[in-house]
Image (cartoon, helix red, strand yellow):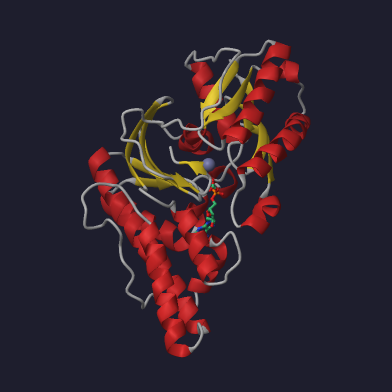
Amino acid sequence: MTLTLLGIESSCDDSAAAVVRSDRVILSSVVEGQAALHAPFGGVVPEIAARAHAEKLDGCVERALAEAGIGLRDLDGVAVTSGPGLIGGVLSGVMLARGIAAATGLPLVGVNHLAGHALTPRLTDGLEFPYLMLLVSGGHCQFLMVSGPGSFRRLGGTIDDAPGEAFDKVAKLLALPQPGGPPLEAEALTGQPRFPLPRPLLDRPGCDLSFSGLKTAVLRMRDALIAEHGGLRRQDRADLCASFQAAVAAVLAEKTRRALAESGAPVLAVAGGVAANTVIRTALQGVCDKAGVGFTAPPLRLCTDNAAMIAWAGIEKLQAGLVDPADLTARPRWPLDALAAPMIGSGKKGAKA
Ligand code: KG4
Ligand code: ZN
């Protein structure tokens, strides 16, 4: 039987709703970003995010249903991100989903936001279990061995910043616009990676990563260049961008090589905004080619935060017979792999899971 689910996502700064079918058809996917609201503050402000979600989510759901050409009575369930993330936003989504479920009698499914990302290649490519997922975005950075809809083993992750966060911070240091990934990548095209920047944690075994020191190294290099030349010259800035990008790519490539060797996974799937970076993507593809494993990356609009991935993860849970009670709660922290050691600190976009 084909299932049709409504998905709702509000864990960070995107209000999103989508309708997805179990035969992997996305009937609609509505994403309303809040970038303009947070831009004056240089980062996501949780209270502003929560209020915007509360205002926008109803409209997103109405649009998603209208674009799918169906009504609530045509659904087989409601899936909602119930964590991890900024609690005010997660609560907005959970309360809306609870209301819809109570009013319609539809099954309610709470989805882990990271599971949504991690299961996306099954929606987009029909990927079979098991596979290795590398999540690299502004808020996430981890290697996950995905063996089933609820079976995730965390092989490693960042101990401080996520790579997208590092791209954004380095772009800010170099007076490039936000979000910093795309302009930094464009700037790097005209530069040479000639500055010696560190390759954090490569000297240590395992798959954990760190990007905060790299950002500080760029800051020092920038200040040294300014002191030497009385300002940051255009070519030096391009060379700094190229050097930073090369360092991130090298670290991600080597840690991916280790994660593939440790897990024995036949395929690597990447997701998250940073996966859009051509240099990083090429480096990862190279590692996979060398290791003789497949490589796949979902289309960008499904790599970044969206509700289609939440609806899909809800479908997988529902098919496994997993339904949540009517009083489903929001969880700010919710590691996918309960056995993995917790990480310290929190990212730009809320608690690291
Ligand atoms: O997945 P995403 O849209 O949002 C979350 O963080 O959840 O990722 C956004 C992040 C931003 O930090 C952005 O700078 C980074 O992905 N990004 C890139 C590129 N495009 C987006 N980083 C490097 N190179 C890019 N081309
Ligand atoms: Zn995300």
Task: Please state the horizontal and vertical placement of residue 147, each as a whole percent of the image.
Answer: 36, 29
Instruction: Say which residue appears at 51% left-offset and 42% top-offset.
Output: 350
| Residue found at the far top of this picture | 105
Picture quadrant of residue 6: top right
- In the image, 281 versus 331, the foreground residue is 331
Report if residue 296 is visible in the image.
Answer: yes
- In the image, 170 versus 188, the foreground residue is 170
Position of residue 61 relative to residue 244, above or below, is: above
Question: Is the N terminus in the top left, top right, bottom left or bottom right quadrant?
Answer: top right
Left or right for 67, reference 334: right
Position of residue 58 relative to residue 326, above or below, is: below
Task: Please state the horizontal and vertical placement of residue 30, each as a whole percent of the image.
Answer: 69, 39
- In the image, 318 versus 216, the foreground residue is 216
Position of residue 311 relative to residue 280, above or below, is: above
Task: Please state the horizontal and vertical placement of residue 281, each as a whole percent of the image.
Answer: 43, 57
Report if residue 7 is visible in the image.
Answer: no
- In the image, 67 versus 341, the foreground residue is 341
Question: Is the C terminus in the top left, top right, bottom left or bottom right quadrant?
Answer: top left
